[in-house]
Amino acid sequence: MVERANKPKPPTLSSTPGLPPQATVTFSDDNSRVIAELPTGESVTVLLYGATVISWKDAQGDEKLWLSEAAKLDGSRAVRGGIPVVFPVFGTAPTHPQTKDLPQHGFARTSRWEFLGKSTSESQTGSAANGPAVKLDFGLSSAAPGLDPIAAARWPFKFNLIYSVTLTQTSLTTSIVVTNDDSAPFDCQVLMHTYLRVKDITAVQVQGLADASYIDKVDGGARKTQSAAEVTITGETDRVYTPAGDPGAGPVTVVEAGRPVYAVTRDNLSNVVVWNPWADKAQGIADFAPKDGFRNMICIEPGAVGAWQSLEAGDAFEGAQTITLLG
């Protein structure tokens, strides 16, 4: 773990003639989170517990992620909201021999990750090609002191995770590399449990999932096909979509009151979970607050969870999502 004495300090490059202003990266006073801010005002905050992104703000300071007011940020339990990292199992898998004894969504989100450093020289494309950017890297391995003790007891494989969070003026990218450092093969699943903030869930449409097959977890795991062009949320929704074609073929777009607000693109993540607890389910979730907060969030969760990713010794799996602000 990086000690406070070695915390990144605000760079002085902005005062050097000929060099543009640079992003600043700092630690919180209690050393629990990393905060990055672009010179144009955009910011991202990552809690070392779970490497959970708990805030993403645009230049005007408007929050783009939903975080429960009752979320535990002290490392006592997984964070409700933001972008928790799901690994090595999505949900629970009572019939899978390697992960049957693990808690829901595995242990990556309940382990303390190490901050590996920053980079401000990420190459970009499109309208952000010449804009400022910052990339934060985090690591977790089977030998890490911050690993959830449940992992070592119930999933005794040697592994290494590198998780990167990249902030630009118009987007946030989260990517993960999973490496099998064991002599034996293991299976895993990966998902980025993204809670996007919206103003009114009843005015939201999710585009880009037409004709996709999905598992409806609210309807007992029934397999269905998305027949309507848009997904609308009118009650508890918990669906695991498998869009046809390559994951990078097209974005999943969140439209609110007729205006596109987010575009989520995927790299090597074949599934998209759409989740909203609605009123009754929210009432029963202890750390979901306010209880009517379901009106202001929608989870669009890219992942590789429709099947197991089987990694032989020395193999690696990579996946990423990019959330772009629209309008």
Image (cartoon, rainbow, N blue to C red):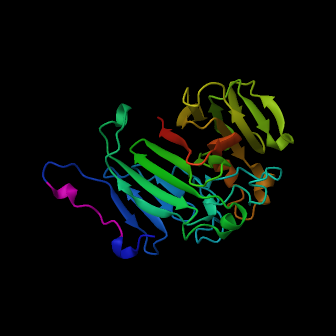
Q: Is residue 158 left or right of residue 118?
A: right
Tell me which residue sits at (69%, 60%) in the image: 155
Tell me which residue sits at (74%, 40%) in the image: 239
Q: Which residues are magenta?
A: 7-16
Q: Is residue 59 above or below residue 270?
A: below
Q: Which residue appears farthest toward the right when viewing the image?
A: 220
Could you tell me residue 251's position as x and y percent? Answer: 56, 31
Is residue 212 visible in the rendered image? The answer is yes
Q: Is residue 230 left or right of residue 321?
A: right
Could you tell me residue 233's position as x and y percent? Answer: 72, 39
Question: Residue 14 in magenta?
Answer: yes
Quarter location, residue 102: bottom right
Q: How many numbered markers are drawn?
A: 0
Question: Residue 304 in magenta?
Answer: no
Quarter location, residue 300: top right
Report the front residue among 9 and 254. 9
Could you tell me residue 208's position as x and y percent? Answer: 62, 28
Could you tell me residue 173's position as x and y percent? Answer: 48, 44
Tell me which residue sits at (60%, 70%) in the image: 75
